[in-house]
Amino acid sequence: MIQLKDVSYVRLGSPDLEQAEQFATACLGLQIAERGKADLYLRSDDRSHTLCYSEGNPKDQTVGFEVDDEASLQNAAATLEALGHGVHAGTAEEADRRKVKAFIGFRDPSGNHIELVVRPERSGRRYFASRDAGITGFSHVGLNSTDPARDERFWTQICNARVSDRIGDIPLMRVNAIHHTIALVRAPQAGIQHINHQVESSDDVLRSYHFLNERRVPIVFGPGRHPTSGARFLYFKGPDGMIFEYSVGVDEIEDEATHRPRQFGFEPTSFCMWGSKPAGMTLPNK
Ligand SMILES: CC(C)c1ccc(C(=O)O)c(O)c1O
Ligand SMILES: [Fe+2]
């Protein structure tokens, strides 16, 4: 069994790094950690980076998850290869570019590009962004899934994710005590469905709603409150249509042994208990 510890980073291809930088710093509220030759590294917490825009095709999207050590990485590679997943062993140069000690890459059953990493770099300097969005850290991703039941089996049976709750066929899965780190959302093709950052307070969510609205950043859902994790949220669109979420107050699962996932219907009230309806996201809005 592969034991995922946490989500580590997202890498997104971008045809326009300047536009990506403008959005990430002036709207989203991330801090520039470094500008490489073709990479823009961004921070949201005490890690060296949690988002990297890389010159290229916006369809190139990767999520990195941390595993314990190099032995776990070798075991993970063997497990995945035995299941028929092509595994790429990252070269030293590729690992440097990701600021990790070592990594492997593979595709999940829907075709999402996933990396498992060992020893992602931390920063000794405190995260300090030029826009005060109240971000406390990168927290979870939504992944497109062409078959959520199949992919749920992959993530739970092979990668030790546990289902905290389900909305219709969307599993919200945890890899540690936090309610969820991965959500699988039905879609016709692979891709990252959304990228979540936690913020400090409900005030930050509402402040950002007005701030982003004034700057004509498309708000696609919220402000609202998820009945599943209990979090107050806001979703908005960034470059190349990528959806970002701020949320605050995500539950933790107190007792791993006794937690039973709840089933919610695939309807708007299961996504927002305040009555907000998604617009421009592939979620039910009636
Ligand atoms: C996948 C969807 C939109 C979703 C549903 C529930 C929660 C939550 O309980 O926090 C999310 O964060 C989501 O992104
Ligand atoms: Fe989310």
Image: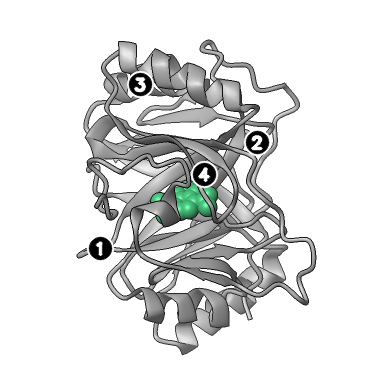
Q: Nearer the viewer, residue 155 or 113?
A: 155
Mark identifier at residue 187: 1
Task: Please name the residue shown 58% across and 21% down the image.
Answer: 203
Label 1, label 2: how far apart the Cα atoms are? 31 Å
Q: Marks 4 and 1, how far apart in space?
A: 28 Å
Of labels 2 and 3, earlier in sequence is 3
Is tag 4's residue or tag 2's residue first in the polypeptide sequence?
A: 2
Residue drawn at (35%, 42%) of the image: 12
Q: CA distance from mark 2 to mark 3?
A: 20 Å
The residue identified by callout 2 is 47
The three-letter code of the residue at mark 4 reads Arg
Q: Secondary structure at mark 2?
A: loop
Indicate the position of residue 40 as horizontal and vertical percent values: 42, 28
x and y percent of residue 233 in the render?
A: 49, 37
Q: Which residue is denoted by mark 4 in the rendering?
A: 98
Amino acid found under the numbered disc labelled 3: Phe
Of the numbered discs 4 and 3, the one sitting upstream in the chain is 3
Mark 4, Cα crowd under 10 Å, few <14 / some 14-19 / many 20+, is many
Marks 4 and 3, how far apart at CA: 21 Å
Where, by quadrant of the figure, is residue 68 drawn?
Answer: bottom right
Mark whose residue sits in front, 3 or 1: 1
Asked if residue 216 lies left or right of residue 94, the reply is left
